[in-house]
Image: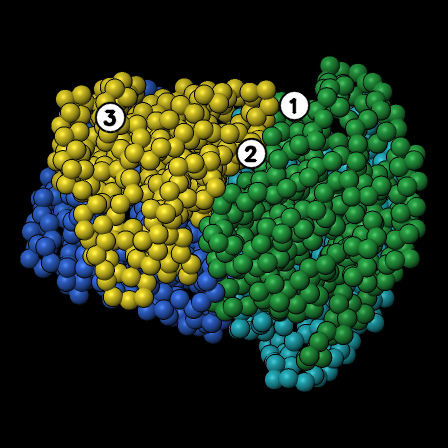
Chain colours: A green, B cyan, C yellow, D blue
Amino acid sequence: MSSSFGQLFVVTTFGESHGPAVGVVVDGMPPGLAVRIEDIQRELDRRRPGQSALTTQRQEADRVEVLSGLFDGTTLGTPIAMLVRNTDARSTDYDALKDVFRPGHADYSYFQKYGVRDHRGGGRASGRETVGRVAAGALARVALATVGVGVVGGTVQVGAVRARAREWDEVERNPVRCPDREAAARMAEAITAARDAKDSIGGVVEVVARGVPAGWGDPTMAKLDAMLGAAMLSIPATKGVEIGGGFGMCERHGSETNDVYDGEKFLTNFGGGIAGGISNGAEVVVRVAVRPATSIGKPQTAATRVGGTTTIEIQGRHDPCICPRVVPVAESMMAITLADAWLRQRAIRGATR
Amino acid sequence: MSSSFGQLFVVTTFGESHGPAVGVVVDGMPPGLAVRIEDIQRELDRRRPGQSALTTQRQEADRVEVLSGLFDGTTLGTPIAMLVRNTDARSTDYDALKDVFRPGHADYSYFQKYGVRDHRGGGRASGRETVGRVAAGALARVALATVGVGVVGGTVQVGAVRARAREWDEVERNPVRCPDREAAARMAEAITAARDAKDSIGGVVEVVARGVPAGWGDPTMAKLDAMLGAAMLSIPATKGVEIGGGFGMCERHGSETNDVYDGEKFLTNFGGGIAGGISNGAEVVVRVAVRPATSIGKPQTAATRVGGTTTIEIQGRHDPCICPRVVPVAESMMAITLADAWLRQRAIRGATR
Amino acid sequence: MSSSFGQLFVVTTFGESHGPAVGVVVDGMPPGLAVRIEDIQRELDRRRPGQSALTTQRQEADRVEVLSGLFDGTTLGTPIAMLVRNTDARSTDYDALKDVFRPGHADYSYFQKYGVRDHRGGGRASGRETVGRVAAGALARVALATVGVGVVGGTVQVGAVRARAREWDEVERNPVRCPDREAAARMAEAITAARDAKDSIGGVVEVVARGVPAGWGDPTMAKLDAMLGAAMLSIPATKGVEIGGGFGMCERHGSETNDVYDGEKFLTNFGGGIAGGISNGAEVVVRVAVRPATSIGKPQTAATRVGGTTTIEIQGRHDPCICPRVVPVAESMMAITLADAWLRQRAIRGATR
Amino acid sequence: MSSSFGQLFVVTTFGESHGPAVGVVVDGMPPGLAVRIEDIQRELDRRRPGQSALTTQRQEADRVEVLSGLFDGTTLGTPIAMLVRNTDARSTDYDALKDVFRPGHADYSYFQKYGVRDHRGGGRASGRETVGRVAAGALARVALATVGVGVVGGTVQVGAVRARAREWDEVERNPVRCPDREAAARMAEAITAARDAKDSIGGVVEVVARGVPAGWGDPTMAKLDAMLGAAMLSIPATKGVEIGGGFGMCERHGSETNDVYDGEKFLTNFGGGIAGGISNGAEVVVRVAVRPATSIGKPQTAATRVGGTTTIEIQGRHDPCICPRVVPVAESMMAITLADAWLRQRAIRGATR
């Protein structure tokens, strides 16, 4: 199924960027848990466009409506359907693009796949699809909190600027969502420069899960690494993922990267909290490569549906750097993946954790 | 299901490193295709241990037996079960490790997950599990060949040595499986140095699919990027994956990385042949981070099952660099992923390609 | 996943009887097909309560809203989410039942499963959940029509009254939805008698698919019989299913029940259009046993949540015989099952049919 | 996946009737359970051909080999692959049938599906595929026994002869596997008469699970009824299934069939131990309609591959009534279905049962 993620905590999103609504059905949320709408809305507000000068100025209130699965504020164990109406969808912005395949966008590949075209703002390929993921992620966080697991994240690189610190409390205090206040300022400059040049810039988002006990994740095909990899690479505009030491380990030796467990804790964490595909009790650490946003104002050559090329300047309202808004989405996908792994491990061992 | 991969071309592996056998069931192989045992054996021979001084000296003939799904050399459309007996399993090599959790290995996390311990050479977590993947990959290659799709791969980095060329014909001519003859020699030196130091070294494997038409891969949750990410990160010892430009795009601008289609071809391939999760007709390019092998001869501190730590020196017969043997496995997982995506697209569009 | 059906044409329903809404997400609808809202609404109107004196008098307009997946009346290939608001949900009818487990209902088993209770009219176990199935079935019909497949159905038994004729055009002309006009009148009498006695009565619904080509359905575990069996037994209040000759074959010999194919057609259809789990080109014929409705006005003994029993008289507004309203639901599940099998066969053979 | 059953206790069978072997992979068996090969072999022996004059005289030792997943007699939690070699496969028996579609058999539908033909004894459609199911069922029984659940079954109807008693201890004492000694004798006569007439006869198999706690089974699409329905209708030669009161309820009223729970037990069991798709603590009761065996010696008209018809007399060695051998298969599918539901419920509630 192309629109579902997870085996026991199953998240199915729906909705096009400029259709009536976007939303999600979460099947598998454990019963008897208290869920407040504010818990969901708060996460959606983090993802929402128009939060700062660094993001798109599209205005969407993104108010969530819960259609099922809750009774008197408690989960029933039944599917939880959630809906967000599209209100500020200026489809006319896109009329000029009707017969053009925008470079870097999914216009051409979607058309080749389906043989039909929804030219209104990317349709299903739009980042707006992630609204459903974030709403589902909010539920996953509620579930994980019952076993003491939490997820944090932030932008750790923009262009050549890298965060050194990992002060997670700092993340919501700067518009870049960087866990390093000093680096955040320089990242903001890089983003502003890109925006002023009618261009965009890439970056890296890091997500960390704390409190994950040893034993989550399935070996071989459903390794926790593999599930997190799929989760992250299913987010629009991501083109790489690494766990723990990641690509940096390629230049190292085993005597450095073998994480030694001293009977109480791991002395290093090159495995990113996962060994053999199974969590080992250390922090689960994932980094995601975010490409420069494909919607840019600069003139670009683009193929047309009838053949030949043309020059386009994408108007619309777009993000010069997607990282700040990818943060809550990546956190959500991490939470969803872990909730699924948790339920799997309950099935295997029958224990609470 | 922890041991299955794919939705329509479904690969289920089984077997422990030192049990009676390892194998695989492939369900979904299209009917009416000619398959020769040699096609499967040849790929297994590439994965086989003991091929050169750079790999483990464990001797396994790895002769495949096909148990079902073929009749007169033709696929029936029914499940194809394949079996390889374990013959050179010196389990006694591992008796000393019975109550020790080897650093970097999955010993500890497996024990926490299942509550039981198979200490014989890693059991299910062993790289030997990949025998089934390579046998399945051989079938996927046969299927893909009918629509003109082929997969190649090689080691493109070992330690600090990077391949510049991509001469795929060169790969089987050097023991590192590097597509750059000159770099291969220096990589071999780095591996030999690690081996002589009773240590191991990491690297990067690149896999490329040629001939993939536009339209394969599902959007949102089952993006081709996501499926390839899961495929690669399910291979033992991998800790990162990137598609096309990958992490390198983080330092670039959209005006550079937006792949322009001129109506006939893409002028660049930062997307790695995939846009919006769907293939766009360019080469599909994936790179995989391979950590240094966790089995090393150097003395290491290790936790024991009863508490406290001890010092171990892993004897056994191990690979100082896993990259050369990961190459056929990564190619196989790429082929399996694409075969699945191909069948999905046939379901959606009903066409041959 | 408890709320999803199908592998390639995937139907996920959500919603409780007395919550804000019920609905469905259909993932896998082929792209490029024309869908009119009327096509969906017409089927929902057939399922709707309050259609005649023989059904519940609960009044629900059951207006469908399509939230995604359609653009300019054409399917995009993306998930189609559909919503029906609950408007006439008199939850207060159920306050008296808050701590009582109604006999025959799912009250007790749901409570044992989830540990929480939604006492408002059956919650998720209510027949109202089938709104989503019927909306999805309407889409499945559109898809199947493109390859010449249609589904009909009707009530063929109520109490001891059996239909002899199979005049499918007759079905919508009588409130029992019986394909035999004469039997329909007697069935209506039986239902009225049950209603007047504050009781309910059981029956049998038959569903037939015409135009199904040979080759649909997968052997062994996913036989078309098995998928239809699951589809039908997932409908509330069903407790049996038979294909073709069904239970009647138990008293026959192979020389009678072996369907002979004369090179052009089958001379008999004891297999119900399926051999070895695969369609053979004959009509696919399924019959479903529908138990008497569990909501009855007669005084009944019921266990209470605190222990012990009490006597209850269920007020509410209920169906004395569910068969007439099961007909569109069973047709929908047949259509959904066949749409899924059709797409599976396209994946396997690559052909249009 | 056509060859897999279950979501958490996943059973994948492989093998053709006259190929090298048949077998199964069971993924999801809980770790730490003691399994003896005899536990598996004993069930296979019950299914084995040649047990009495009432069954086929094909001689197969059906010795099982366990290839993985066990270590020192204990389950590891990893996939358990099991293999049975085909030894008495007289494929030449079938040469005459190479270009003929046997009536009632899956020859024609398989050929239409796959476009290739395995004429050797039904190939994948053969009852021999159930070897894997029975081996998997033996494991499911071991798992269920840890929570006090057991499965029994027997032939309760052959032709017009019905069992009245349900003396399950009697089942293995008569060749019909009937839980009613007196009826068993008359059933044996009916089967012998059919055999002597070179014909076959149908029947009904009943399977009962005892000790199932309330709360197993998922609502809506994965109701326990639906999963059992799919499980039973996936067995070759079955064409109907009913739960509890089944089709018999069609002639009754709700005031009779509403199972009253008196706070300790259910006074009746028309629901067959399931309400709303979830077990309620009563015995789970399922009956399966078994058609007359399609392989009969009597002359029959059969279509040929080149067009037109011919007359055939099937030689081979066949069962005049399949019920006695369906019993262990139906029990196995019941056990597999319940093991899966048990693990699902552990995931949902985290409890041991």
Q: Is residue C308 above or below residue A299?
A: below
Label 2 – label 1 distance at C-alpha = 15 Å
On the image, the x and y values in percent for residue A157 come to: 85, 51
Count residues near mark 1 (Cα–Cα under 10 Å), then give few for <14, some for 14-19, many for 20+. Answer: many
On the image, the x and y values in percent for residue A342 come to: 56, 61
Task: Using the image, name the chain to which the residue with label 3 belongs.
Answer: C
On the image, the x and y values in percent for residue A131 come to: 65, 42
Residue contact at pointers 2 and 3, CB within 8 angstroms: no
Give left or right: position of D341 versus B74.
left
Q: Are marks 2 and 1 on the same chain?
A: no
On the image, the x and y values in percent for residue D94 come to: 31, 38
The C terminus of chain A is located in which quarter? bottom right
Give left or right: position of D112 versus A137.
left
Amino acid type at image mark 2: Pro
Amino acid type at image mark 1: Arg
Label 2 – label 3 distance at C-alpha = 34 Å
Amino acid type at image mark 3: Pro
Q: Is residue A250 above or below residue D20?
A: below
